[in-house]
Amino acid sequence: MAADVIDGKAFAAKVRGQVAEHVAALKEAHDLQPGLAVVLVGSDPASEVYVRSKGKMTVEVGMKSVEHRLEADTSEADLLAVIDQLNNDPTIHGILCQLPLPGHLDEDLVINSIDPAKDVDGFHISNVGLLGTGQKAMVPCTPLGCLMMLRDYHGSLSGMDAVVIGRSNIVGKPMANLLLGDSCTVTIAHSRTKDLAEVVGRADIVVAAVGRPEMVPGDWIKEGATVIDVGINRIERDGKKKLVGDVDYDSCAARAGAITPVPGGVGPMTIACLLANTLTAACRANN
Ligand code: GUN
């Protein structure tokens, strides 16, 4: 039987609609407008696309959107000064510094200079620690979006076997923590994992977040499993540019019970969760 296609685009539109309603209510009740600042250093083309899309959707839900575009050779001191100014700006509730940063900048230092209460990416070491210990944290947007889709589809995830392929700080590790929080039995697989096919074959839930085009073939997938594809890979096939995920969609869809497409799966949910996190940050700041 063909897999159910989990429509991240539609789900994200619903989440943005709910955020917009809350934003309107905050304005009405407290004369408060949530504000999101995005800092982009340099002009990485993929980052430019994300930043433009984030700005557009921030405005669409009624929030204030601010962009700081800095030259690729900006010094660490100058970048930290911009973040310090945003940390102290009461009209800004969320700060996102687009990654990757140019090589001369210390990513950990920069991320940890953001006020944890405004860290809508959930990358600050305080938020990582809060999530890891099951406390109230700002949760990274991509894994949060994946979790929302899984909960929406399955209801409870309790007792399910989940395999996360990829151990990045942005997706793999927080995803594993979130699934653990929902009482899954979690395995984190990565490039050194022995017999990845066997590990993936045991999973009720597979989250692929490796950044390698179509690396998970359908015959690794357990019949009826749910496949969440975090990959966004630009490839060229038959002379045409194409966007593909980290799983081979057609063969995985033939075995899975449910699957997210690329595009239109995880991607739109990431921005919706960023807006939801910004709303949360604004509400907490107002309390
Ligand atoms: N680069 C790729 N994904 C992300 C993300 O979720 N947040 C930030 N800040 N940079 C990214």
Image (cartoon, helix red, strand yellow):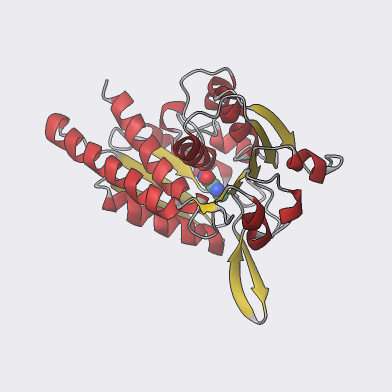
- Tell me the quadrant of the picture where the N terminus can be found: bottom right
* Residue with the most extreme right position: 194
Provide residue 164's location: percent of width, then percent of height. Answer: 67, 38
Provide residue 217's location: percent of width, then percent of height. Answer: 74, 56
Residue 43 visible, this angle: no
Side of 113 relative to 235 (left or right): left
Side of 61 relative to 29 (left or right): right
Picture layout, residue 182 above or below residue 229: above
* Residue with the most extreme front position: 1
Residue 9 visible, this angle: yes
Picture layout, residue 31 above or below residue 285: below
Which one is in front, 38 or 120?
120
Instruction: Please give the count of numbered marks on the rendered protein.
Output: 0
**Splitting the image into 4 quarters, where does residue 35 fall?**
top left
User: Residue shown at 18%/40% (left/top)?
Assistant: 24
User: Residue shown at 47%/46% (left/top)?
Assistant: 270
- Tell me the quadrant of the picture where the C terminus can be found: top left
User: Residue shown at 63%/37% (left/top)?
Assistant: 169
Which one is in front, 134 or 80?
134
* Residue with the most extreme left position: 28
Provide residue 204's location: percent of width, then percent of height. Answer: 65, 37
Provide residue 120's location: percent of width, then percent of height. Answer: 44, 36
**Splitting the image into 4 quarters, where does residue 95 fall?**
top left
Picture layout, residue 134 above or below residue 93: above
